[in-house]
Amino acid sequence: MTDASSFRSWMIDANDGIIATASLLQGFAGAGASDRLLLLAATAATIAGGLSAGGAKWAEVAVEREAEQRLVREESAELEADLRGEIDELTAHWQAKGLSPETARTVAEELTAHDALAAQLDAEFGIEELLTPAAPIWSGFATATAIAFMVGASIPLLITWLVPMQVEDTVIVITVIVSLTVTSIIAARAGHLVLRKVLVRSLVVGIGTMAVSYVAGLVLF
């Protein structure tokens, strides 16, 4: 992933944190929650949301590694059963890439001699490097997704802590709109996207989610 793509993804995750936490607070506010309960809800949403994002990344990488290991077993068995056939497949792969039949054969044989399994995994599945056993755990703890979510969630959390309850709802809505506008501008510039489209999507999702949450709290509780 490029630096621009990573940064844009970080902005999107931060937006998720802003919208999720602010919408939860609007739902509680619609239900007539006390200031103390709103503080508890905002704090819990920030912590739980970050942990959930990290857990989701851990699960995603774990599944990816399991799939890789299954492919390793399958390809190893195929190499053991029919090495010549696998070299033929690898030759065809390089021919399809534009090499002459002779050059493709030479490349296939040399790559197979160097690391037959790696050559097959790269050619057939685009796997250049296998995930290590520690990769899922590391991804869960160090993922930027969790950090970005918690940074975004901290915005409505801080408002809940610092702003008087009488104007808290209004300040949260205004701050969320401003925050989503800023992050949309940054994400659009980083990804060379159309600002208007990015901004409209973010605001529609953010304001719509808060509105639905507030009405749900008002009507159901």
Image: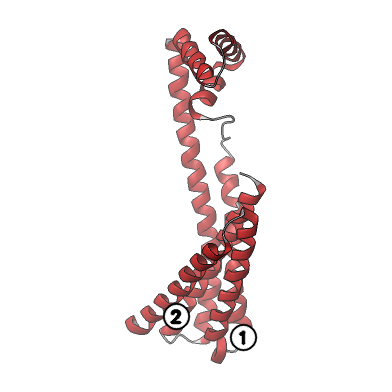
For the residue pair 189 and 166, the one nearer the viewer reads as: 189
Residue annotated with mark 2:
28
- Type of amino acid under label 2: Phe
Residue 127: quarter of image: top right
| Residue 171 percent across, percent down from the top left | 57, 84
For the residue pair 8 and 27, the one nearer the viewer reads as: 8
Dot 1 surroundings within 10 Å: few (below 14), some, or many (20 or more)?
few
Does 41 appear above or below 103? below
Q: Classify the position of the C terminus by image quarter.
A: bottom left
Dot 2 surroundings within 10 Å: few (below 14), some, or many (20 or more)?
many
- Type of amino acid under label 1: Val
Q: Taking the image as drawn, is residue 6 in sight?
A: yes
| Residue at image location 51% in from the left, 66% down from the top | 202
Residue annotated with mark 1:
163
Q: How many marks?
A: 2
Measure the alpha-carbon separation of dots 1 and 2.
16 Å
Does 98 appear above or below 101? below
Q: Taking the image as drawn, is residue 151 in sight?
A: no
In the rendered view, how is the structure colored? secondary structure
| Residue 220 percent across, percent down from the top left | 33, 81
For the residue pair 53 and 84, the one nearer the viewer reads as: 84
| Residue at image location 49% in from the left, 52% down from the top | 56
| Residue at image location 56% in from the left, 36% down from the top | 133
| Residue 10 percent across, percent down from the top left | 60, 57
For the residue pair 51 and 151, the one nearer the viewer reads as: 151
Q: Classify the position of the N terminus by image quarter.
A: top right
Farthest residue to the bottom: give it. Answer: 166
SS for tag 1? loop
| Residue at image location 57% in from the left, 45% down from the top | 137
Instruction: First in sequence, mark 1 or 2: give its number.
Output: 2
Q: Which mark is residue 131?
A: none
Task: Give left or right: position of 30 versus 127.
Answer: left
